[in-house]
């Protein structure tokens, strides 16, 4: 089982985040938007979070599995030391000066098999930046240790392009029928009526997801399961310009997809208070994954 749990921006919410991690007890926790003003403070805060939740964060002695990003927001990976161990030489970090925020990629061994994990936070502003970064994500997600078994989770700040068996988008269009709002500029594409110049056909920008899913590179785990659609964001701002959306996603490689048995938000009072993004739990049948990897 791999889990993504997002602590949120405010340091005062740390106890709530710690409670979510303890309550859910993940095998692997992929974290984004860890606030810290500098690299040293980031490492201190990740170590503290690991200590308070009984998880581990050092992929080798003295080195924390955390990527220092731009704009005071960072990413990290924690794991249960009783079931999971980091694989030496597989950890890579993308952040300050390279990405708007940050990404950490590494491989862990779970019950005797190796699974690569990645934690990423996309920029909240800049549609073109998100599209450009998605190309960087594809390279990281399809090379080296991550090629066969990968679970790639994050706050993608954009909607998936996955479709249902009926051919419709799994994520419904959240902007249909809404009045234009300045904040939609960061998230939407639109057309102009050639005769009047009026803004028409306002829609979510799904281009970053198109890069990740190109040619079957990665698969949206929740959409592939075909269950009930559940939002991960919007509970703090029910009357906001974006509405309820699912922008916290778990992308998995082809080998992992048949072993996914669950992918849904953790909807508890504590989780809703801890962050404006709900934690996303992705559950993997490890014996099935072992079988799939052995057959490749």
Image (cartoon, grey):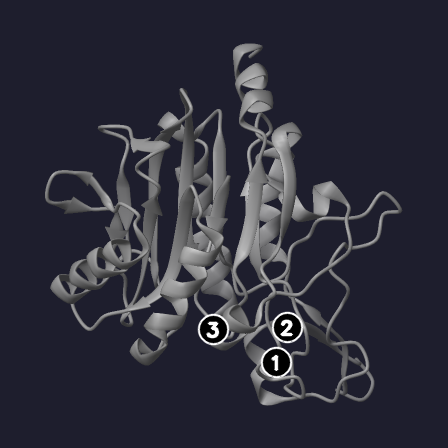
Mark number for residue 201?
none
Q: Which residue is mark 3?
A: 275
Q: Residue at x 27, y 71 (%)?
A: 72
Q: Is residue 217 above or below residue 164?
A: above
Q: Which x, y percent locates residue 116?
A: 41, 33
Say what secondary structure mark 2 lies in: strand
Q: State the residue position of label 2.
A: 188
Q: Position of residue 231 (x, y in %)?
A: 66, 65
Q: Which residue is mark 1?
A: 184
Which mark is first along the chain, 1 or 3? 1
Mark 2–mark 1 CB contact (< 8 Å): yes
Q: CA distance from mark 3 to mark 1?
A: 21 Å
Q: Which residue is at 26% across, 52% downward?
A: 66
| Mark closer to the chain start, 2 or 3 | 2
Q: Could you tell me which residue is drawn at 16 percent across and 68 percent down?
A: 38
In the rendered image, residue 85, in percent from the top left (x then y), is placed at 30, 31
Identify whether 93 is placed above or below 38.
above
What is the C-alpha distance between the residues marked 2 and 1? Answer: 6 Å
248 left or right of 43?
right
Are dots 2 and 3 in contact, CB under 8 Å?
A: no
Query: How many residues crowd around disc 1 within 10 Å: few (fewer than 14), some, or many (20 or more)?
Result: some
Q: In the rendered view of the protein, which quadrant contains the C terminus?
A: top right
Pointers 3 and 1 in contact (C-beta within 8 Å) = no
As drawn, the residue found furthest toward the right would be 166
Q: Nearer the viewer, residue 163 or 200?
A: 163
């Amino acid at each position: 089982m791999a889990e993504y749990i997002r602590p949120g921006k405010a340091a005062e919410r740390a106890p709530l985040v710690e409670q979510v991690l303890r309550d859910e007890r993940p095998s692997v926790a992929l974290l984004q938007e860890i606030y810290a003003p500098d690299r040293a403070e980031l490492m201190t805060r990740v170590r503290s979070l690991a200590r308070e939740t009984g998880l581990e964060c050092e992929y080798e002695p003295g080195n924390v599995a955390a990527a220092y990003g731009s704009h005071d927001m960072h990413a990290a990976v924690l794991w249960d030391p009783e079931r999971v161990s980091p694989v030496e030489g597989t950890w890579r970090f993308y952040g300050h000066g390279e990405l708007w925020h940050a990404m950490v990629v590494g491989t862990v061994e779970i019950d005797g098999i190796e699974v690569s994990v990645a934690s990423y936070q996309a920029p909240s502003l800049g549609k073109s930046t998100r599209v450009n970064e998605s190309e960087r994500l594809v390279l990281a997600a399809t090379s080296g240790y991550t090629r066969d078994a990968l679970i790639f989770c994050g706050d993608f700040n954009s909607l998936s392009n996955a479709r249902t068996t009926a051919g419709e988008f799994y994520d419904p269009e959240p902007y249909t029928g809404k009045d234009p709002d300045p904040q939609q500029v960061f998230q939407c594409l639109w057309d102009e009526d050639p005769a009047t110049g009026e803004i028409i056909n306002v829609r979510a920008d799904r281009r970053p997801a198109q890069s990740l899913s190109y040619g079957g590179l990665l698969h949206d785990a929740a959409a592939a399961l075909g269950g009930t659609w559940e939002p991960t964001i919007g509970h703090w701002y029910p009357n906001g310009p974006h509405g309820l959306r699912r922008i916290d996603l778990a992308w998995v490689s082809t080998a992992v997809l048949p072993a996914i048995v669950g992918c849904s938000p953790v909807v508890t009072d504590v989780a809703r208070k801890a962050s404006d993004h709900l934690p996303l739990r992705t559950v993997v049948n490890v014996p099935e994954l072992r079988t799939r990897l052995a057959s490749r």
